[in-house]
Image (tube, grey):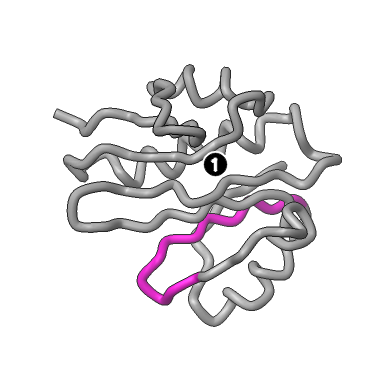
């Protein structure tokens, strides 16, 4: 069974190592006030979502799933939990993504739409009313 929980700032070093195992070239900055969700299977990290709240928007800074757990609903669980946490926040949610990312459909199912800013593709979910 997959569970999703919030990581404590004291766990951020191990979360960074996990994120690097998925995205080796990523520049990872976790601040104590950030929200980091961790998906686990039998005590092992299998996914994460990094959320940063700013004055006028929320950044879904990163979402990743361990390759052997992709297509098993882990990404869906993470997105749903993140959006549940944000349901009372009346700010748009932004997620930067590569245009050909295979999980674009997952994000679209959860209300994100593609916006293009120059060469950068950003998914935006409108603020909750």
Number of marks in picture: 1
At 40% across and 65% down in the image, what residue appears? Answer: 34
Furthest-left residue in this view:
129
Q: Give me the residue at 53% from left, 66% from top.
A: 7
Would residue 39 be counted in the magenta stretch? yes
Query: Residue pushed farthest front?
Result: 118
Residue 104 among magenta residues: no
Say which of 117 and 73 sits in front.
Answer: 117
Q: Residue at x 49, y 31 (%)?
A: 121
User: Which sits in the foreground, 54 or 5?
Assistant: 54
Coordinates of residue 84 in the picture (x, y in percent): 36, 40
- Give the secondary structure at mark 1: helix
| Residue at 22% across, 33% down | 127
Q: Is residue 73 left or right of residue 128?
A: right
Asked where in the image residue 77 lies, by quadrant, the reply is top right
Quick check: 17 above or below 66? Answer: below
Q: Quadrant of the N terminus?
A: top right
Q: Position of residue 104 (x, y in %)?
A: 57, 23
Does 21 appear above or below 11?
Answer: above
- Residue 5 is situated, as x and y percent measured from the top left of the image, at 53, 56
Label 1 environment density (alpha carbons within 10 Å; few <14, some 14–19, many ≥20): many
> Mark 1 highlights which residue?
78
70 lies left or right of 118: right
Question: Residue 99, located in which quarter of the rendered image?
Answer: top right
In this rendering, position of residue 23 left or right of residue 94: right
- Quadrant into which the C terminus falls: top left
Q: Write down the quadrant of residue 103 in the picture.
A: top right
The magenta span reads 30-41
């Amino acid at each position: 069974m997959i569970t999703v929980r919030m990581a404590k700032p004291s766990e951020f070093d191990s979360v960074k190592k996990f994120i690097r195992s998925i995205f080796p070239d990523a520049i990872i900055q976790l601040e104590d006030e950030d929200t980091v969700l961790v998906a686990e299977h039998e005590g092992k990290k299998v996914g994460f979502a990094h959320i940063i709240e700013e004055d006028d928007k929320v950044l879904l800074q990163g979402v990743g799933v361990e390759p052997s757990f992709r297509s098993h609903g882990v990404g869906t669980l993470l997105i749903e939990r993140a959006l549940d946490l944000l349901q009372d926040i009346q700010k748009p949610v932004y997620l930067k993504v590569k245009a050909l990312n295979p999980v674009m459909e997952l994000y679209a199912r959860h209300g994100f739409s593609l916006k293009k800013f120059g060469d950068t593709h950003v998914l935006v979910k409108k603020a909750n009313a």
